[in-house]
Image (spheres, rainbow, N blue to C red):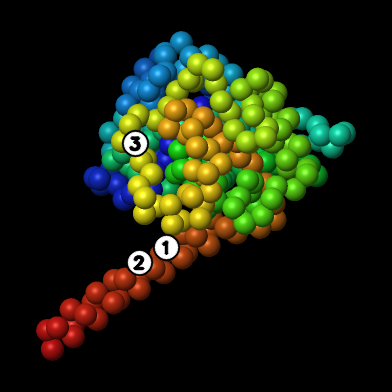
């Protein structure tokens, strides 16, 4: 399944904390809470399919409210080791991922997942490491474009041969006949789950953003559950991108506050 992590500011002040948990270590109450959160945002899903998908994964990022410990989101993880023409690589697949709307905009999951990718790269320094994800929502695709310096597919250049072959192998191996390599999407004869209507809608004004427009053009059936297959590389530039993004946000907030204080001081003088 794909990732749902929209970016508006949180609706209330709860702070998220998270940790990576092995799937066999999940408690029954955690599985129930994960299912409750999942079904708030996805349609055409069943508990049996949810449990089957979870059983394929090795680990889960569990996200809780820091105050009361209640489960507010999660992201499942599966690590692949494959070869393309005798060249080994490692791929980290992020499966079902969802976060309660009150916590949208917090970066706890991104920080945990970035650290996970970096640890995976440190364990495999001599082979390429990729983030493999599928997206039926444009916000998932933006997570890739905003957090990975090297990713595919993208609007400004074609996918090179090696990552195209890696993506084809992963999609074909995991999803079989649902993979449509000519379009770069997954299309299922029976819908495997879709975002509920009104969750992450694509309004006309959003299409001015080149990444969002590209996502819609490449995956026109996204509202019906079609998934765009994507790949990001954990390369030398990757460790710098997320800290720089946080720094830019901090500077922007500081400048906004400074302008507001200056305007208030000028108005009172």
> Vertically, is 185 above or below 22?
below
Q: Name the residue under label 3.
A: 199
The answer to which of marks 3 and 2 sits earlier in the sequence is 3
Query: Residue 166 placed where, x, y %?
Result: 74, 36
Viewer-nearest residue: 218 or 237? 218
Which residue is pictured at 31% across the width and 36% down the height?
Answer: 198
Residue farthest to the left, as pictured: 268
Q: Is mark 3 on a helix, strand or loop?
A: loop
Residue farthest to the top, as pictured: 48
Q: Is mark 2 on a helix, strand or loop?
A: helix
What number is the disc on residue 253?
Answer: 2
Which residue is pictured at 35% across the width and 66% down the height?
Answer: 253
Report the Cα–Cα distance between label 1 and label 2: 6 Å
* Labelled pair 1, 2 in contact (Cβ < 8 Å): yes
Between marks 3 and 1 in the image, the one whose residue lies nearer the viewer:
3
Which residue is pictured at 43% across the width and 32% down the height?
Answer: 223
Which residue is pictured at 62% across the width and 56% down the height?
Answer: 156
Query: Residue 245 placed where, x, y %?
Result: 50, 60
Query: Residue 57 placed where, x, y %?
Result: 58, 23
Q: Is residue 222 left or right of residue 6?
A: right
Q: Mark 1 points at which residue?
A: 249
Query: Residue 255 placed where, x, y %?
Result: 35, 73
What number is the disc on residue 109?
Answer: none
Which quadrant would residue 93 be assigned to in this image?
Answer: top right
Which quadrant would residue 200 be assigned to in this image?
Answer: top left
Q: What element carries label 1?
A: helix
* On-image quarter of the C terminus: bottom left
Residue farthest to the bottom, as pictured: 269
């Amino acid at each position: 399944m794909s990732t749902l992590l929209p970016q508006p500011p949180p609706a209330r002040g709860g702070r998220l904390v998270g940790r990576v948990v092995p799937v066999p270590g999940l408690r029954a109450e955690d599985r129930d809470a994960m299912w409750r959160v999942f079904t708030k945002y996805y349609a055409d899903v069943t508990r049996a399919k949810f449990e089957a998908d979870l059983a394929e994964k090795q680990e889960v990022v569990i996200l809780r409210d820091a105050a009361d410990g209640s489960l507010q989101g999660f992201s499942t993880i599966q690590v692949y080791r494959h070869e393309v023409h005798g060249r080994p690589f490692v791929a980290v697949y992020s499966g079902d991922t969802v976060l309660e709307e009150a916590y949208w905009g917090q970066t706890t999951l991104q920080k945990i997942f970035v650290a996970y990718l970096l640890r995976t790269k440190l364990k495999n320094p001599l082979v390429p490491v990729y983030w493999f994800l599928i997206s039926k929502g444009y916000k998932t695709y933006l997570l890739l474009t905003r957090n990975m310096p090297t990713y595919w597919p993208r609007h400004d250049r074609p996918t090179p041969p090696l990552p195209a072959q890696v993506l084809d192998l992963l999609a074909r191996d995991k999803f079989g006949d649902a993979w449509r390599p000519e379009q770069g999407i997954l299309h299922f004869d029976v819908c495997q789950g879709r975002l509920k209507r009104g969750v992450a809608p694509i309004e006309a004004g959003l299409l001015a953003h080149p990444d969002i427009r590209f996502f819609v053009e490449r995956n026109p059936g996204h509202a019906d559950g079609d998934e765009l297959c994507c790949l990001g590389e954990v390369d030398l530039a990757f460790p710098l991108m997320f800290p720089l993004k946080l720094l830019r946000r901090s500077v922007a907030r500081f400048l906004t506050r400074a302008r507001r204080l200056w305007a208030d001081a000028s108005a009172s003088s």
